[in-house]
Image (cartoon, coloured by chain):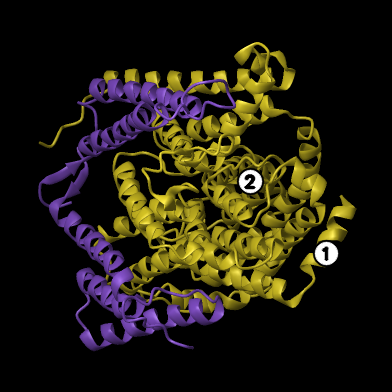
Chain colours: A yellow, B purple
Amino acid sequence: MFDMLLGGLGLVSSFSTAALVGAGLIIGLFVGALPGLGPLMGIILLLPYAITFPPVQAMGFLIAIYVGGSCGGAISAILLRIPGTPLAAATLFDGYPMAQNGRAADAIGIAISASALGGAFGGLILILFSPSIAAFAAGFGPPEYALLAITGLTAIAAVSDQSMLKGLIAGTAGLLLATAGTDEFTAAERFTFGLFEMSDGFNIVAIVVGLFAISEMSNLLTGNDLLDRPTLSIARPGFRTVLLVLRHWPNLLRSSSIGAFIGALPGAGGVISSFTAYAVAKTFSRADERYGEGAEGGIVASESANNATAGGALVPTLALGIPGDAVTAVLIGALLILGIFPGPTLFAQHSDIVGGIFLVYMLANIALFVVGILLTPLFVYVLRLRKLVLIPTVLLMCAIGTYAVGSSIFDLWVMFAFGIVGLILRAGGYPLAPMVIGVILGPLLENNVRRALLLSHDGLRIFIDRPVSATLVFINAALLLCVFFFTLRRHFAGRRSKPLPVNT
Amino acid sequence: MTGPLVIGRRTAGWCAVALMLVLVALVFEQIRDVLGPSGMAEGGPYDNAAAYPRGVTLVLLGLVALQIVVQVVARRRVPADGFTLRQLVRPAAVIAIFGLYLGLLGPLGFHLTSAPMLFAVMAVCGARQWWQMIALSLAISFGLAWFFESQLDVVLPGGIFHLNIPW
């Protein structure tokens, strides 16, 4: 592990890396603070810029956006009572009342300090656990990898905010979309419709930008607040707020552990972890702490948990190449574009890059404390930005960013088409993250299914003949049973309830 | 929410199901008409390029069938929320403007199309300070062009007039 970190140190110790991490944090805090954007959108929009750098610097930039974006939502939650991202929804329970009591600067300072400390804890988990998991997975063969990919997909569908069945449908459609292009085994062109631009399949950036950014902008356009400019007074938190956080150290440790653990589970992201940590902190709190009325502990719990989630989510992402959510799926996409294949091989062959990624993650969390505290007044100004400026700017960035990846007008039409697809799926209540994860995991799944069948003498029996893959088959079967059980339970529970009036 | 529903959640759900069925149909059509005749839909795991997509499509078809059952059975309980005409006009107009922009980007180039697109979207959003909108549109489009062209060496579409600024 220390060799890995020492190897990474050589890649990280440069001014350009530090500058990229700093820039990523500022952008992350910016997109996190603005309602309607968020870390995923920030990463998507800046992905074309990031991939012009070497792998560790590119990941430093993108991870810093992830870290900053996970924290930035707290600023608008505290000041406006509108969480900039769903990750900060639990923060407003106590952050907004605290601001109303005249302690807005303290609330923001506590949120940033807790985010930085929670994120650093998540980083320690990442550094301690991912090498062991990668070492264990080094013995995996095609059947295990194929089943791991399926597990990643079923798990994210199983914990989808919306219908589990819809999550599975979206994920399976993503697997299917990934088959377009040249078949890696036979070099045959599949589903290209005679278009040479399709021979490499769909551009992942075009898919992600279309699905998330276009549909999100369209969603913002349905609101009536496009011309509104919030009036806010400038809050200037101080570095001493870290002491306020450290007074809640048992809560900080517990919430960070919850965040890192939940982050490592595929599909269970920062929203679940922040609400869980908040609920647990409230249960353990003293009566005089008055959760929900401006308790410092409430902000510490939700913010430390949602930033620790980022570290936890990177464990399966780096060690197994299995993304836990849409953000880590895009991070894997970035690594693949840069020619780096996450998983045990990465740990074995490019340990310096892994060490570098660990270090930039830690650096981003340490820098978050300084950058966040110093630049909070700037982000308060950012909150005054009207959506009528934000929406066209994001649309132009979608176009220019997608074009920049391959200088292809065709990719722009792919983005547009996926924007329409995203709108339809979103309106129909389908989660979009499983579709992106399906597209990312598709090639991994297909290659390993076919390799496993080539190795097998008994067809599909190879998947249950080996202990690890048999266990994964069992886990997948259990997850699928859960999906069907909960779908049926929701149905029957609904039948017993009074039917809702239908507007015709 | 004001006005009658134009697209309710139930209709949107059926649109999504239809989209998935189109995807399924496309895959089967391609396997039958393109991969099959060229011999890529037969043989073992190595040679058969159609087996895996066919398998995934069958799984998708099964899941969509289950979703159809769920939607039919639960049709009376779907909440009566959705989008009204007033809510849909603005996103539809912006999508149309964006589509038009993408269509003109190739022939006319980035610099001639981006600022008008930004201006039009701001106008649809309700902005009416015309000079401010023109200034913002030009600043945003040229600012982003400068960043991508001079800092990242991306050559943006110049169109038939080959309009590329040597920053």
- Residue carrying label 1: A9
In terms of depth relative to the viewer, which is nearer, A52 or A406?
A406
What is the quadrant of residue A165 in the picture? Answer: top left
Q: Position of residue B124 (x, y in %)?
A: 20, 69
For badge 2, the amino acid type reads Ala
| Residue A71 percent location from the top left of the image | 57, 61
- Residue in view at x 48 percent, y 35 percent: A175
- Please give the chain letter of the residue carrying mark 1: A
Task: Tell me which label, 1 or 2, sits earlier in the chain.
Answer: 1
Which residue type does callout 1 highlight?
Answer: Leu
Q: In this picture, is A155 found above or below A207?
A: above
Is residue A243 visible to us here? no
Check disc 2 and report the residue beneath it.
A313
Q: Is residue A239 above or below residue B138?
A: above
Q: Image quadrant of residue A113?
A: bottom right
Along the line of sight, the residue nearer the viewer: A487 or B33: B33
Element under label 1? helix
Pointer 1: residues within 10 angstroms few (<14), some, or many (20+)?
some
Q: Is residue A164 rendered to the left or right of residue B101? A: right
Q: Name the spot of residue A3 as percent of width and height, x first.
A: 89, 54
Q: Nearer the viewer, residue A204 or A246?
A: A204
**Residue in view at x 31 percent, y 87 percent:** B135
Task: Check disc 2: other Cα within 10 Å, few if <14, some if 14-19, many if 20+.
Answer: many
CB contact under 8 Å: marks 1 and 2: no
Disc number placed over residue A441 in the picture, else none: none
Distance CA(mark 1)–CA(mark 2): 22 Å
Residue placed farthest to the right in the image?
A: A3
Disc 2 is placed on an element classified as helix
